[in-house]
Amino acid sequence: MSNAIRKAAVRGSFYPYSCEEIEDQFKQFNASFDKVSIPNEIRNIIPRAVIVPHAGYIYSGFTANFAYRFLAQTKAKRIIVIGPSHHHYFKGISGSYYEKYETPCGELNIDSPYLFALAKQFDIGFEPQAHEKEHSTEVQMPFIKHYFPKNQIIELIYSDTTAKNIAPLITALLQNKDNVVVISSDLSHFHNLNEANALDESCLKAVATLDLEEFKKGCEACGLIGIKAMMMAAKKLKLSSKLLDYRTSYDASGDKSSVVGYMSAMFY
């Protein structure tokens, strides 16, 4: 994959096409964030990992930005983005074996030597079709370029695997102080608002209490494997969790009949 660039595939659809438009959107998110009353005891927490949604920015951008505002306080040098594959089925985990990752505001450098080292230890393969247009990870990159313009990144996409297989990888990543982890997931899809709120409640409660059993009460997160793996790693590393924001597409669309849920949370 020498000199290869992972091109921005959902630019202009999930998020704005131009850097200027993206920066304007981030200004709007942050103007709204600055109006939120955040308890002093969590205001200065520096997360080791976050959960963020991956829908179009008009729907979930504020919720994602909420987590990135906390993550922006980190001194970590490397950001590992982990998300589910929506377009290509394969077994296991695939890594972004490119040199750079395109965003509208410039390219991000991929830490290829570190990825190669991880791949040997955790059997990370390469499925090109999984990376070509995967939005769950791509929509995170403009946020990362904005808040961490000089940091290196790694993109990991999983398909047919289990949380128990991914948890040791996340644990190892977080044992290195140079790393922070971004877990990408939306919540329930296409239920009416009341049903979505009820289903999403089990996801929110599970993350807030680090209780994997709560997921069995209805959580339908599309990145559930990644969330569970993150929680397993958090428990092993004795990290705490904190919910940051929850909303649904109804907040942007006004349509209660068929909504998607979005959550952001942090681990510290």
Image: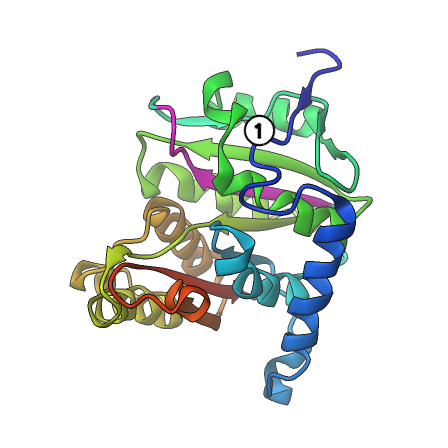
Query: Hey, what amino acid is under mark 1?
Result: Leu
Q: Quick check: can you spot residue 119?
A: yes
State whether the magenta stretch is mostly helix, strand or loop: strand
Q: 204 or 116, which is in the foreground?
A: 204
- In the image, residue 192 above or below residue 153: below
Q: 45 or 24, which is in the foreground?
A: 24
Q: Quick check: can you spot residue 127?
A: no
Q: Position of residue 38 (x, y in %)?
A: 60, 85
Which quarter of the figure is the C terminus placed in? bottom right
- In the image, residue 7 above or below residue 266: above
Outermost residue to the top: 2
38 relative position to 252: left or right: right
For image coordinates 44% across by 41% down, the residue present is 168
Q: Position of residue 69 (x, y in %)?
A: 67, 66
Crowd class of label 1 (few under 14; some 14 to 19; many from 20; radius 10 Å): some
For image coordinates 37% across by 47% down, the residue present is 223
Q: Quadrant of residue 37?
A: bottom right
For image coordinates 49% across by 32% down, the residue present is 134
Q: Position of residue 128 (x, y in %)?
A: 51, 17
Mark 1 lies on residue: 118
Q: Quadrant of residue 31?
A: bottom right
Is 84 in the magenta?
yes
For image coordinates 54% across by 45% down, the residue present is 14
138 relative position to 111: left or right: left
* Magenta residues (range): 78-88
Which quarter of the figure is the N terminus placed in? top right
Is 89 in the magenta?
no
